[in-house]
Image (cartoon, grey):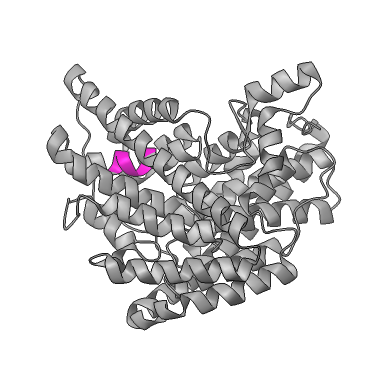
Amino acid sequence: MQAPSPSSPPRAVWPRALALTLLVGLACGVSSGVFLMALDAVTQARLRHPALVWGLPLAGVLLGAFYDRWGARVQGGTNVVLDHLSTAGSPGIAARMAPMVLLGTLVTHLFGGSAGREGTAVQIGASLGDNLARRLGADPSLARRMTLAGVAGGFGAVFGTPFAGALFAIEFGVVGALEVRAAPWLLASALVGDRVTRAMGVRHTAFPPVEGVALGPSLALRWLVFAAAVALLVRLFHALTDGIKHQLAARLSSRPARLALGGATVLLLTALVPDAGRYLGLGVSGIVAAFGAQDTAAWAPLAKLVFTAVTLGAGFIGGEVTPLFFMGACLGATLSGPLGLPPSLAAAVGLATTFGTAANAPIALTVMAVELYGPGVAPHALLVGAVAWALVGHRSLYSAQRWARDKRLARLEGRPSTRELSDRAW
């Protein structure tokens, strides 16, 4: 069944919708602030005690048992949010999603799993938005809008980029069908969430300034080569992560066993890969270093890709965004020399377009690049993001992400879409 229309509420409902939006933004801001402070605490603990990584297999066993016992309705992660948004009559997102994904992400990072934070923030925000709306008696259309407001608030607050957060929620649900009529509510939630998180004392990563350069024909051609490299990197990430996930599921029915094997594989990689510590956890220091092309090995993007694919493919909890930021920024640093690109600009464009391509959100990530690095990066990020997105094709980080054309054809023919059928099979 198709999702309810996200059309704007009648004027009489606007005061209630606005109040609920501000409440969702406040909840997202507080939860993101708590999450980021806790994440920093466990990351610092791991850096002070590197031997904690040896506990990753055991942590995987306990995490797997925890999700087997209580995670039946939330184990799909961000795909649960997407299924809720695209299904009429959905029972809603389980309230337990927020605390479970928070705990799971902190465990993953404490013991050195290579994961991000976007998935956690989006899932917490969506769960808060949906549950607040339903408990306050909102109708399904308004509750759906508040779920998206939670996505915007969580994404905007966790990265300090509220406009990108709102646009991510607009692009997020159905590829090719922008939720533009919900834009005021999404932006309000993202702005409130960001302000609240900052008021709690959270400081986001400070990146070096990036100076824009004129986009002429010669530079555009070099960016096309760069876009092809971004697309190849994204396709490799999709293929390896999905391949590990499906192969483990086919061979090991036990979730704790899959997580234990994934943790043991990360340990093996740590022993084999030089300077492996920079590929554990978020990898923020590696991202910052890439902006000056400092100590960035040519194989760094692939190393982070493998660490992250093993961690997430095995079933550890966390997002994909910051690892993809790492891969993209390091790819930019690596290719800046051969392609004659300014290193900081190449790192900024690589960071934004790698995740934008992987998540089918090139507009949101172009805006994020502007919020982080200034307007000079916009034309370069937009060009690379559009070309890389076209080259990657019908792929996504999220198996439940719908495509507008596929849905329209299915509706006309009265059948499930091919994307829905593939989702069910998966």
Is 264 displayed left or right of 343 in the figure?
right
Residue 103 picture location, percent across and down: 59, 71
**Quadrant containing the N terminus in the rendered view:** top right
Q: Residue at x 46, y 32 (%)?
A: 363
Please state the total of marks drawn on the protein image: 0
367 to the left or right of 275: right
Residue sitting at 64 percent across and 59 percent down? 27
Who is closer to the viewer here, 17 or 45? Answer: 45
Residue 252 rendering spot, x and y as whole percentages: 61, 63
Residue 89 lies in what quarter of the image? top right
When the figure is inspected, residue 53 is found, relative to residue 9, above or below; the finding is below
Q: Is residue 214 above or below residue 274?
A: above
Please indicate whether residue 70 sits to the left or right of residue 135 in the image.
Answer: left
Q: Residue furthest front?
A: 251
Give the image location of residue 180, x and y in percent.
Answer: 62, 29
Decide if residue 118 is in sight here. yes
**Front residue of this view, candidates 148 and 329:** 329
- The answer to if 422 sits in the magenta stretch is no
Vertical placement of residue 370 versus 129, above or below: above
Residue at 71 percent of width and 46 percent of height: 146
Q: Is residue 314 left or right of residue 225?
A: right
Instruction: Compare residues 369 and 329 and report the one nearer the observer.
Output: 329
Q: Does 133 sit above or below residue 42?
A: above
Q: Position of residue 380 (x, y in %)?
A: 30, 30
Q: Residue at x 44, y 38 (%)?
A: 356
Magenta: main secondary structure: helix
Q: For the magenta stretch, what is the residue range?
A: 348-353
Quadrant of the image containing the C terminus: top right
